[in-house]
Image (cartoon, rainbow, N blue to C red):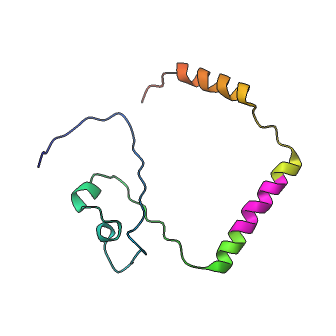
Amino acid sequence: GLVCKLNTRCSILAATNPKGHYDTKQSLSVNIALASPLLSRFDIVLVLIDSNNEEWDRIISSFILSRSEKDKRNNHNYWDMQKLRAYICHIKTLQPKMT
């Protein structure tokens, strides 16, 4: 294979799903079917495991939906499309410098 060192000026965030159900008894590379050499290129690997708990899912979904209804009733001042476009045009003019 090709071995080289590349300078980068960006960050990459990647996500993947397990091949079937995540097996905590198996290694990460086996669970996501990604070879160890490629997996080793990532600085941080976070594993989020969803436990099959219907009661917890019901509590979380109820909370999210109730917050959404409260936001609608509070009539928050969301940006209209024109203001959002103006903001994006302004952001494109910025040239941040890494320090």
The foreground one among 59 and 16 is 16
User: Which corner quadrant holds the C terminus?
Assistant: top left
Which residue appears at 34% of the width and 70% of the height?
Answer: 31
The x, y position of residue 36, in whole percent, is 24, 62
The x, y position of residue 29, in whole percent, is 29, 66
User: In the visual, does 59 lie left or right of 73?
Assistant: left
The foreground one among 91 and 98 is 91
* In the image, farthest residue toward the left: 1
The foreground one among 79 and 8 is 79
Magenta residue check for 62: yes
* In the image, farthest residue toward the front: 20
The foreground one among 82 and 63 is 82
Magenta residue check for 15: no
User: In the visual, does 96 lie left or right of 84?
Assistant: left
Which residue appears at 43% of the width and 61% of the height?
Answer: 46
First to last magenta residue range:
61-70
Count of numbered marks: 0
User: In the visual, does 55 lie left or right of 43?
Assistant: right
Which residue appears at 39% of the width and 44% of the height?
Answer: 12
Magenta-highlighted stretch: main secondary structure? helix
The x, y position of residue 33, in whole percent, is 30, 65
* In the image, farthest residue toward the top: 93
Which residue appears at 37% of the width and 55% of the height?
Answer: 44
The x, y position of residue 3, in whole percent, is 13, 45
User: In the visual, does 83 lie left or right of 91?
Assistant: right
